[in-house]
Amino acid sequence: MITRLSTVQDYGRMVEIWLEGSKLSHDFIDEHYWASQLSDMKEKYLPMSTSYVLEEAGDIKGFISVVGNYLAALFIDPRQQGKGYGEKLLNYVKDQADSLDLKVYQQNDRAVGFYLKNGFAIIEEQIDENTSAKEYVMTWRRES
């Protein structure tokens, strides 16, 4: 299992994982919303971020994307969840950062719990202007 910087050639698989994961973990948002975001994800969001993939024998199991100290995405192939891959990717990015911030939908209990377990704290509640869903702003700071 290796973690490496993503390449443009990885974007197709990354977007597949993102779409599957988004529909599964955000079932409270119309799945047409996620489909409408596909081209932006591939052509706008992934290129503007620094992304790392977790790969085994050429198969991408998941990815994490950051923009500065903002954790923009962390998605694991739904068939590969529960194996510690998300924590492995998160720790990879945390090792390179002094702080990370993110937004997560409040109804995504599994993700909220994951981030709390991994040292993030809820600092604010707000409404996502794109979906009108409630979300938490969370932060992690390296302990000195």
Image: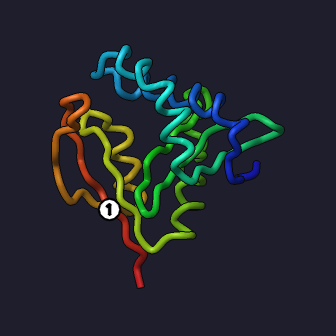
Q: Residue at x 49, y 24 (%)?
A: 38
Quick one: which residue is furthest to the bottom in this view? Answer: 144
Examine the image and state in which quarter residue 110 appears: top left
Q: Residue at x 53, y 55 (%)?
A: 90
Quarter of the image for the C terminus: give it: bottom left
How many numbered marks are there?
1
Q: How is the image coloured?
A: rainbow
The secondary structure type at the circle numbered 1 is: strand
Indicate the position of residue 100 as horizontal and vertical percent values. 40, 63
Please give the residue where the numbered disc 1 appears in the rendered image. 139
Examine the image and state in which quarter residue 112 appears: top left
Q: Residue at x 51, y 31 (%)?
A: 18
Indicate the position of residue 75 as horizontal and vertical percent values. 52, 38
Examine the image and state in which quarter residue 83 appears: top right
Indicate the position of residue 45 as horizontal and vertical percent values. 48, 41
Question: Which amino acid type corresponds to the residue marked 1 in the rendered image?
Answer: Thr
User: Is residue 138 left or right of 97 when viewed as pictured?
Assistant: left
Indicate the position of residue 17 as horizontal and vertical percent values. 57, 29
User: Is residue 117 left or right of 131 when viewed as pictured?
Assistant: right
Q: Would you call the spot at circle 1 few (<14 residues within 10 Å), some (14-19), or many (20 or more)? A: many
Q: Closer to the camera, 104 or 109? A: 104
Q: Is residue 17 above or below residue 67?
A: above
Q: Closer to the camera, 38 or 21? A: 38
